[in-house]
Image: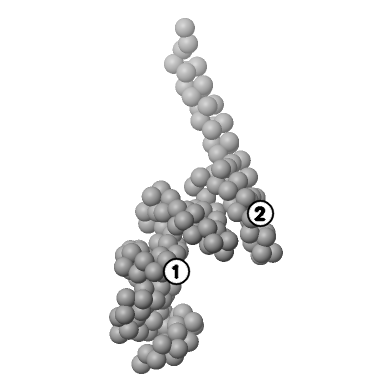
Amino acid sequence: MKSPLNKLFLTVMLLSSSVALHAQDKKKSNDYYIKGQQHFASADYEDAINDFTLAIEADSNNYNAWIRRGFTKSLIKDFDGELNDYTTVIKREPTHLWAYISRASAKIRRSEFKEAIVDCNKAISINPKEAEAYNNRGFAKKGLGDKEGACDDWNQSKKLGNAEAKIILKNNYCK
């Protein structure tokens, strides 16, 4: 019969080894993520996707790998895969700002403007000072024919420091 002290020791040992394995998984995930970024920078998108996938397999909470893999999928025209990656992050981490911003961009490219606005609004509720959320919402509003609303959002994006917004405002004849 095991004593309570032996049970406690065994529990502590199991927890310690679990923590050590998790740290190894995070390091391995980060290493694959860095390799994926290098492949991405070289426009080697298939290898980048493979490395981001390995990063996710090593640590499914590596949301940067999910986001980068999604964006990389968009470059090879795997738009459904892109959207699935962003949606997976949102399901796992409902306050992940960049998952909403990225998914809104994907929806704008798919002409799903109303759905993109929903994602932009959620991103703005998470961080009202994120210029890119206003920028995207402006494009979604433009897609719906709401020029005034689009211009308002691009002006807000500009106020928040988005240098691109100044060009967008000029190109869209906003005041």
- For the residue pair 51 and 159, the one nearer the viewer reads as 51
Q: Is residue 109 above or below residue 147?
A: above
Image coords of residue 140 (percent x, y): 36, 73
Callout 1, which amino acid?
A: Arg
Q: Is residue 168 shown left or right of residue 121?
A: right
Q: Label 2 to label 1, Cα distance in Å? A: 24 Å
Q: Locate the C terminus by quadrant.
A: bottom left
Residue at image position (43%, 50%) is 88
- For the residue pair 6 and 123, the one nearer the viewer reads as 123
Q: Is residue 40 shown left or right of residue 100?
A: right
Number of marks in the image? 2
Residue at image position (46%, 12%) is 3
How crowded is the residue under tag 2: few (<14 C-alpha within 10 Å), some, or many (20+)? some
How crowded is the residue under tag 1: few (<14 C-alpha within 10 Å), some, or many (20+)? some
- For the residue pair 102 and 63, the one nearer the viewer reads as 102
**In the structure shown, which secondary structural element does the residue marked by tag 1 occupy?**
helix
Q: Which residue is mark 1?
A: 109
Which circle's residue, 2 or 1, is located before the other in the chain? 2
Image coords of residue 117 (percent x, y): 33, 68
Q: Is residue 152 above or below residue 3?
A: below
Q: Of tags 2 and 1, which is closer to the observer?
A: 1
Q: How is the image coloured?
A: one colour
Q: Which residue is mark 2?
A: 47
Image coords of residue 138 (percent x, y): 37, 77
Q: Is residue 90 above or below residue 4?
A: below
Q: Which quadrant of the view contains residue 157?
A: bottom left
Furthest residue in direction top, as rendered: 1
Residue at image position (42%, 83%) is 158
Q: Is residue 89 visible?
A: no
Callout 2, which amino acid?
A: Asp
Q: Are marks 2 and 1 in contact (CB under 8 Å)?
A: no
Furthest residue in direction right, as rendered: 42
